[in-house]
Structures are given as structure tokens and as C-alpha cells.
Image (tube, rainbow, N blue to C red):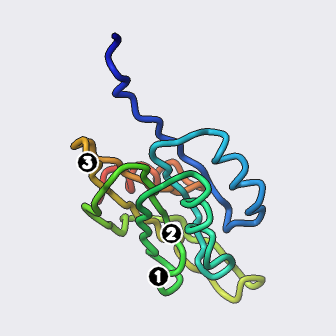
Amino acid sequence: MGNASTATRVVTYNVQRWKRLDAIVETLVQTSPDVLCLHEVCATTAPDALDRVADACGMANAHFFGHVREGRYGNAILTRRPSTLEAEWRLAGGSTIGGVAMSGTHRIVRGALVVALDSGVHVACTHLDHISEDERRTQARGS
């Protein structure tokens, strides 16, 4: 008899504020993840989306860190096996965007979420700055 696999399938996916929720759920189910790291999770546009993904993918735990928009927008980690929240961080840096069309400027705030799996492995989920390589370096350094 062979050894049971100890591999853990980790999938990372930018859900883009759940713009195409049905397609996202279908795609994620097909990946058969053990751990899902999700970016641009918006609890305003689709309040039940995380529960829907968790149910469809057989996930036992859902951890969400809403680091902007009054706690309603951020990153999530869903896990098939038991897991516990370890840390939530607001990252340094962030590009400034905006102008007249956006009624001013604002800094793109980023966050990181860390959970511990029951195997002892730690998983971190973040979505670094998409505009500036220098800002990504700042965010990755943590200062």
C-alpha cells in the first residue's frame, strides 16, 4: 500500500469584486483546491459570495480581512481542513491614483492575511500594488 499524498493544492485567484460570480465559482470548483487565496473580495457587491464559494468547493473555513472600504473589501483564505487566523496586516506604501474624474486622489491600500493550517503550514494571502514596482518592493519588505 502506498503512502497517502501530503500535497496541498493552493489556488490563488483575483475575483475582481465578483463581477462574474457564476464563472468564478465554476472555475474554482474545477481546480479542486485545498486552500483558496482570493483577492479583491468585495462584501458589498456580493455579500454571500464567500459562503457560496466555500460551499461549492467544500471548504470548512473562510477567513476574510477587509482592510479597506470600512472592512468590506480585501483578501480571503478558504481552507478545506481546519485552520486558524494568525495575522492581518495593513501593508506600507501603495500607489496614489485619481484626479478630477475621481473627485481627488487616494492611496491604494493593501493588506495581508495569514492563516495556520492544521498541518502546521502557514499560508499568506496578499495582493500587491499593480501600478508601481517600487511600491510592491515596499509592501513586500513591510516598511
Give coordinates of residue 107: x percent, y percent: 52, 74
Residue at the spot x=49%, y=52% of the render?
37
Label ID, residue 71: 1
Looking at the image, is mark 3 or mark 1 earlier in the sequence? 1
Reading the image, the residue beneath label 2 is 74
Residue at the spot x=60%, y=56% of the render?
131
The alpha-carbon separation of the residues under discs 2 and 3 comes to 24 Å
Question: Callout 3: helix, strand or loop?
Answer: loop
Q: Is residue 69 above or below residue 87?
A: below
Looking at the image, is mark 2 or mark 3 earlier in the sequence? 2
- Residue 42 or 53: which is nearer the viewer? 53
Three-letter amino acid code of the residue under disc 3: Asp
Label ID, residue 118: 3
Give coordinates of residue 87: x percent, y percent: 27, 63
Question: Callout 2: helix, strand or loop?
Answer: strand
- Residue 112 or 135: which is nearer the viewer? 112
Q: Is residue 128 visible?
A: no
